[in-house]
Image (cartoon, helix red, strand yellow):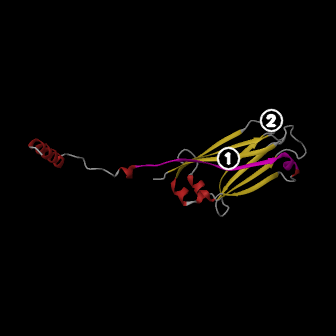
Amino acid sequence: MNRLQHSLLFSILMLSIFACSEKQDFSQYDDLSITPSLETSIFFVKVQELLINSATDISFFTQDFNFDAFEEVFFADRVLEGVISYELENTTSKPIQIELQFLDENDVLLDSEVFTMDAAPTALLTREVAYGNTGKSLDILRSTSNVRLNASNFGDNVSSSEIPGASVQLRSSAQFMLRLK
């Protein structure tokens, strides 16, 4: 190697030894917040008008749905807020009422939602119920173990809708925001 190359190499080595660099900061991970939004269907119930007419009591449908998903530690510790959406459609000749009861593991009532709808023709009834900072307490969701659905007929048991396949349908879904980190 010639002298110029040695000088250049020596200069580069000296610059790299004394070069300024900022200390790396890896604490940014601690400030990271991951909050995905998860959406799921909860339940779908459809009762034909024929079944409603055959009921001898005002209550034509009662069902308990096990819903331990809210009790899971992963969910309960991380949920920030959520919205449960309901859609109710009544194409029968009867005015109806549907009550949803949110129950804890000891069947203690935590909350309820009541839907009342006239006989057909009616519009689709939609409702969104918020939980968290902008709505009801998240403790309702965290403590819910069962959802009880009770559907009642406030009409007669003999009339029939002219709509083919007349029924009462209730659909629900939920969207929750969780903190993963």
Q: Which residue is mark 1?
A: 172
Q: Amino acid at mark 2?
A: Pro
Q: Nearer the viewer, residue 67 or 149?
A: 67
**Residue drawn 25% across the image and 50% down it:** 23
Query: Bounds of the magenta span?
Result: 32-53
Is residue 148 highlighted in magenta?
no
Extreme residue toward the front, this view: 1
Is residue 131 something that shows in the picture? no
Query: Crowding near pointer 1: few (<14 within 10 Å), some, many (20+)?
Result: some
Secondary structure of residue under mark 1: strand
Q: Is 181 left, or right, of 62 in this rendering?
A: left
Residue occupying the far right of the picture: 158
Q: Amino acid at mark 1?
A: Ser
Q: State whether residue 73 is above or below residue 128.
A: below
- As displayed, is residue 26 above or below residue 122? below
In this rendered view, identify the residue nearer to me: 35 or 15: 15
Name the N-terminal-most of marks 1 and 2: 2
Q: Is residue 32 left or right of residue 140?
A: left
Can residue 175 be seen here? The reply is yes
**Residue 121: which disc?**
2
What residue lies at 72% left-to-right and 57% top-to-bottom? 64
User: What's the distance in space between the residues labelled 1 and 2, CA to CA?
Assistant: 21 Å
Mark 1 and mark 2 in contact? Answer it, CB < 8 Å.
Answer: no
- In the rendering, at what x and y percent does residue 50 appear? 87, 47
**Percent coordinates x, y for residue 119 in the rendering:** 81, 39
Residue 30: % across, % down: 38, 52
Residue 40: say if magenta.
yes
| Labels 1, 2: front one | 1
Residue farthest to the bottom, as pictured: 106
Instruction: Choose top left, top right, bottom left or bottom right for residue 105.
Output: bottom right
**Mark 2 secondary-structure assignment:** loop
| Residue 169, percent from left and from top | 75, 45
